[in-house]
Amino acid sequence: MSKPEYFEDFAVGDTFATQSYTLSREECVAFARMYDPQPFHLDDKAAQESIFRRLAASGWHTAAVIMRLIVRSGFLEKAGILGTGIDDLRWLAPVFPGDTLHVTGEIIALDPDLKGRPFGRMRVQLYAINQNDVRVMSEIANLTVGFRPA
Amino acid sequence: MSKPEYFEDFAVGDTFATQSYTLSREECVAFARMYDPQPFHLDDKAAQESIFRRLAASGWHTAAVIMRLIVRSGFLEKAGILGTGIDDLRWLAPVFPGDTLHVTGEIIALDPDLKGRPFGRMRVQLYAINQNDVRVMSEIANLTVGFRPA
């Protein structure tokens, strides 16, 4: 879609796709050490004995990479777009060091009815997809988007 | 509660609380630069003109800190506890550099009915709470937990 600036410029069904991003092993381990220090995110041998079979990225790392890709895409550089919450976040498949992810988004709901507030609500279905076209994570982002000034 | 190891050891209504963690300004900016490079997470002046009024941590940083605190609490060091997804994640109040967060958890559902699989499902209501006793984020974690071996 073109570059909408205000709530009125969006429509249910609008889609977008981001650039891609490759997670290095170094980044995966650094994120996990700080925020998700479970053995299968840190240590090869422990990971081999886990359900993942090899070192896997933290699911919260995948969530953070999705945010990075969306911010870099420019989608949020609009009037008053702000995230208020996430619904139905699901880790669908493991993410491994070396994987290359991109994100697709589709606007699934727009609700202007906010009792006089200067913004409406938007819901966006997001998928993170790896280099093999496998969906590794899904989530629905709840956003506020400013109305066009009168 | 004591140290349950298997699905059968948990009960709806069980609660836990983690240690606390203080987010430094350096860490907030480093996380945002990497994963959520929006002006109000990076730059004081831009933040002053935003809804946050001052530099705020990324909401995904708060989510990552919650995970850190839960892992460090030992709650996940049980048989086969694995996160499959998150429901109803809400950023309730801003988190600022210097804030000290801790997490409370309550088991709100246990479902053993998994058609012969060796684990049950658990839902845990989580809150991140700051040093002023304000809930800054809530989420429901969906986990699998292994049954006690026969």
Image: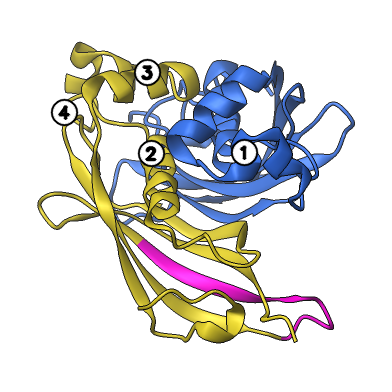
Chain colours: A yellow, B blue
Host chain of mark 3: A
Q: Is residue A75 above or below residue B72?
A: below
Residue at which label 3 appears: A30
Q: From the viewer's perspective, is B130 left or right of B142?
A: right
Q: CA distance from mark 1 to mark 2?
A: 22 Å
Give the quarter of the figure containing the N terminus of chain A. bottom left
Disc 4 is placed on an element classified as loop
- Residue displayed at 54% across by 41% down: B60
Disc 3 is placed on an element classified as helix
Residue B35, image quadrant: top left
The amino acid type found where label 4 is placed reads Arg
Q: Judge the density around disc 3: few (<14), some (14-19), many (≥20) Cα neighbours within 10 Å.
A: some
The amino acid type found where label 3 is placed reads Ala
Q: Position of residue B124 (x, y in %)?
A: 60, 44
Identify the disc placed on residue A53: 4
Q: Earlier in the sequence, mark 4 or mark 3?
A: 3
User: Mark 3, mark 2: which one is toward the viewer?
Assistant: 3
Residue B13 visible in the picture: no
User: Mark 1, mark 2: which one is toward the viewer?
Assistant: 1
Q: Position of residue A51 (x, y in %)?
A: 23, 32
Residue B134, image quadrant: top right
Q: Inspect the magenta stretch and tell me whether residue B33 lies in it.
A: no
**A97 or A1, nearer to the observer:** A1
**B94 or B146, nearer to the observer:** B94
Q: Inspect the magenta stretch and tell me whether residue A124 lies in it.
A: yes
Q: Is residue A1 above or below residue A28?
A: below
Label pair 1/3, CB-CB below 8 angstroms: no
